[in-house]
Amino acid sequence: MTDAFSSLPTNLREALRRAALDFPHRGIAIFDSRGRSCERRSYAELFELATDAAARFAGLGVGRDEPVLVALPTSWEWMEAWFGLVMRGAWPVASSGAGAMAAAEAQFEKVDKVMAAIGARQVVASEAFQAQAGEHGFRFAAGGVITSERLRGAAPATRGAAATGVSDGGDVAFLQLTSGSTGLPRAVMITHQGAIHNPVASDEAIGAPFGEPMHRLAECMVSWLPLYHDMGLIGCLMLPMLCGLDSWLLRPEAFLARPRLWLEHLGSHGVSFAPAPNFGYQLCVERIPADKREGLDLGAWRAAFTGAEMVRPETTGAFCAAFEPHGFRPESLRPCYGLAEGTLAVTFDVKGSGVRTLPAPAGADAGFAMTDVVSNGVPIRDTSLRMTAPDGSILPEGAIGEVCIKGPGVFRGYYRDPEATAATLKNGWFSTGDLGFLADGELYLTGRTKDLLIVHGHNIMPDDIERLADSVTGGGGLLRSAAFSVARGAAGEQAVVVVETADGNPERLAKIGREIRVRIGRTMGLPLADLVFVRRGRIPRTTSGKMQRGELRQHYLNGTLERLHDGPTDETAPHDAGTEPGP
Amino acid sequence: MNLRETTLAAIAKVSKVDVVGIRPDMDLVADLGFDSAKALELLVELEEALGIEISDEQAARLNSVGDILAIVDGM
């Protein structure tokens, strides 16, 4: 047990080399976009592919410690690029490619902005991505795109392509994009040490109820999580590679189209485990009705993690009820807590006795509509956890405060953003912006201090929604908007936008309201649960003019927010999306 | 049911909006509350109900009910 931690690889290059040597029969299977067929390669083959790609990246002039975006879907092209950059000693930055429902142009704009913000010269993407970005006039399309074809056609550098030597574990390995308050994603600097320690410590915590690390018991991980998300990258790619397990990777779209695929594969490749946000479990309950559950055998699925967004007992209960007759063990459901700034995992349930709850205490965020709060377990090895009051003082057990974490997984800082780093990272302690309390050393989440929406496990900054709403000018003296989320039962968090206006004409407001919904929908693929018009000055602000979204949200929840015009598009809103607090 | 009716029935099923309330000018996200999960659910429903395959490129351009009906009309 302890020797696993005394002999960890020093960096990810070494980790991949060891996987190739130590686990010759293990590897990664990646499904096509529909989840029909898969292409499997061993870690030894991945090592060769990445070593070759590193030489070609070097031949293309990609340098050490140079950030390079990877905007590809889950595929072998992604693996070649990401691991090739790691072997080169450059920093891969996984970014979402074009997704369903969000306009391609919005994706290009995001890539363009991220590249500018982190000073990246190159993005690895498909030929179609390059062509379309060029048609839209994005500058990076001219010379800034490395397609797989260009990479494979590049002359390899003959010397010094693969980074060698013992890189300090504290060196940056890659950048993880997460949402930032300025409307730009923040680039979280993840160290080699964090990327290696975190998954191995997770393996230990996952195996705790079985008395041995999970990899001694399991054959594989089955995941549909995107690789640009920390739970997909660290939990579903690094962990299997470091611990010698097979990884079966579905694209998120394949799961969203046919959720049953995930469960089928969890049951058919030997003892398995897998994480998903609450929404993934909810989707399985809703989209795989009783008559479609026939033939599923989930007996091999020994650990089912739920994290990345608030765990809802309604969902976990419904999931167990639905799938227990098909071999699922309720004690396999294991809540966990983590975030990009912690590399991934912070706490895990290590009891393995099912989802455990406490009644929601006074002071839990009413907007999350929780009657019970869920135990997320205890910190992983070498990691500390404490709750702090707004003045920074450390709170005793039972008191709600901001969750602060310290340990080998804590990030080095936000790349090129020393202010944001200094504001959140002090003496090794990272202030997460999440609120919770400890009971018997276990973490229970109750809300968050940061202005952030987490929809289907994806973090969304309110600024991004507000900017789109503010860009709609209906000629009615539109002023300012504010966005926040409210949660209702198993549906999880949903977006609400409040718009200040001097206009009182219901028809014009209805038109503006629809345009706002269309613009946010086309750009972000995000439906609004509610859109509220209020008179100017109704969005609370501090004396310095800073918007107070939390207070506004409280007014909304209390029903004390005076609507100018009762729901301009309610007549066409779907029945299940309304989150009307008042009459 | 003809192809148009089949299509509208699939949209109604996924959006949980009564089929009589669904009009071609409706936006999938803004008016019918689609998110990416519902959009992909709809694609599967349509492919199975109509016996067609909708490419990723086609799917990326579907914003409204009318956009979907246009595919059906072209069959």
Image (spheres, coloured by chain):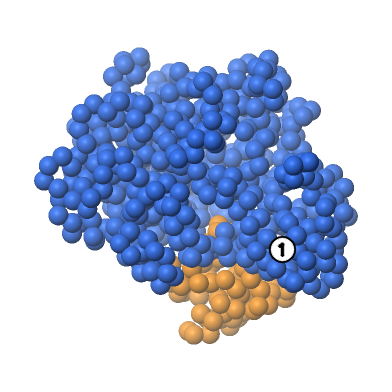
- Whether residue A299 is visible: no
- Label 1 resides on the chain identified as A
Local secondary structure at mark 1:
loop
At which x and y percent is residue B59? 48, 69
Q: Is residue B73 above or below residue B62?
A: below
Q: Which of B58/A476 is in front?
A: A476
Q: In this view, does B13 lie above or below A352?
A: below
Q: Quadrant where the C terminus of chain A lies?
A: bottom right
Q: The orange chain is which one?
A: B
At which x and y percent is residue A409? 44, 27
- Number of marks drawn: 1
Query: Which residue is identified by label 1?
Result: A574
At which x and y percent is residue A581? 82, 50
Q: The blue chain is which one?
A: A
At which x and y percent is residue A48? 18, 43
Question: On the image, which quarter does residue A32 sit in?
Answer: bottom left
The crowding category of the residue bearing disc 1, from other C-alpha atoms within 10 Å (few below 14, some 14 to 19, many at least 20), is some
Residue occupying the point 52% across, 65% down: A103
Q: Quadrant where the N terminus of chain A lies?
A: top left
**Residue that protrudes farthest toward the front in the picture:** A544
Residue occupying the point 59% across, 40% down: A309
Q: Which of A453/A368 is in front?
A: A453
Residue occupying the point 62% across, 37% down: A311
Question: On the image, which quarter does residue A554 sit in?
Answer: top right
Judge from the rendering whether residue A512 lies leftward or rightward of residue A93; answer left or right: right
**Residue that protrudes farthest toward the bottom in the picture:** B74
Q: Which amino acid, by three-letter code, is at mark 1?
A: Pro
Judge from the rendering whether residue A328 lies leftward or rightward of residue A561; answer left or right: left
- Whether residue A89 is visible: yes
Q: Which of A138/A245 is in front?
A: A138
